[in-house]
């Protein structure tokens, strides 16, 4: 009888050893950045908890504004990881992310068309609003390599035009986010 109890105890211990540490915890979230939405940028993001303190995120941004006098047409993708000090989706966190941006920006007198890619770091804080909703503030900075073409859109097709091509490294903000998340 004692031998059966020891075997049962060992089997239960082995079964619980492989079980997740947080059986009832949220492990996936979808979110929208309210600051980007205020600037007419459509955006969505998804985040998955990998461990108690690490999560992986993927965000996409698209701004379709393109008129004769103003162009803010761009698309961007960010892939990153976050280290949470308390647990995933709650409290302080540090993040690192890779970014790609394709853009066509300008006004009546200048146009910038090109792409940028880089990496950055960020810091943020997330508050739980309820069991399934939270709000997070995040700011980040990073290093980008940009390749773009600059030209004057007022020049007609029959005139000579100077087109400038630039390649450079730039230290710039990579994130400024007030996001609302729904947690699964």
Image: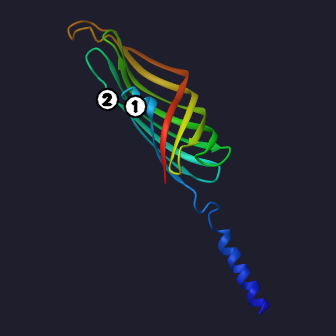
* Number of dots carrying numbers: 2
Q: Residue beneath label 1, please?
A: 37
Q: Residue beneath label 2, please?
A: 64
Specify the quadrant of the image occupied by residue 80.
top right
Q: Is the image coloured rainbow, by chain, by secondary structure, or in one colour?
A: rainbow
Q: Which residue is drawn at 64% across and 44% down?
A: 84
Please report whichever mark, 1 or 2, sits nearer to the chain's N-terminal start.
1
Q: Where is residue 81 in the image (x, y as percent from the top left)?
A: 58, 43
State the residue lying farthest toward the top: 159
Q: Where is residue 138 in the image (x, y as percent from the top left)?
A: 56, 33
Q: Residue at x 55, y 55 (%)?
A: 26
Specify the quadrant of the image occupied by residue 165.
top left
- Which mark is nearer the camera, 1 or 2? 1
> In the depicted view, which residue is nearer to us: 41 or 77?
41
Q: In this view, does 166 lie above or below 17?
A: above
Q: Where is residue 54 in the image (x, y as percent from the top left)?
A: 62, 48
- Assign the N terminus to one quadrant of the image: bottom right
Q: What element carries label 2?
A: loop
Q: Where is residue 13 in the image (x, y as percent from the top left)?
A: 71, 74
Q: Is mark 1 on a helix, strand or loop?
A: helix
Question: Alpha carbon of mark 1 to alpha carbon of mark 2: how far?
Answer: 12 Å
């Amino acid at each position: 009888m004692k031998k059966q109890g020891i075997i049962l105890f060992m089997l239960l211990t082995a079964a619980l050893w492989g079980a997740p540490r947080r059986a009832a915890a949220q492990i996936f979230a979808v979110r929208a950045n309210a600051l980007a939405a205020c600037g007419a940028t459509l955006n969505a993001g998804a985040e998955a908890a990998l461990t108690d303190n690490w999560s992986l995120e993927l965000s996409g941004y698209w701004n379709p504004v393109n008129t004769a006098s103003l162009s803010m047409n761009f698309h961007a993708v960010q892939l990153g990881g976050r280290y949470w000090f308390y647990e995933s989706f709650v409290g302080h966190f540090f993040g690192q992310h890779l970014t790609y941006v394709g853009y066509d920006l300008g006004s009546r007198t200048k146009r910038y068309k090109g792409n940028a890619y880089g990496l950055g770091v960020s810091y943020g804080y997330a508050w739980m609003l309820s069991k399934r909703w939270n709000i997070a503030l995040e700011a980040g900075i990073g290093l980008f390599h940009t390749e773009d073409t600059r030209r004057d859109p007022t020049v007609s097709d029959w005139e000579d035009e100077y087109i400038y091509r630039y390649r450079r490294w730039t230290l710039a903000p990579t994130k400024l986010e007030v996001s609302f998340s729904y947690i699964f």
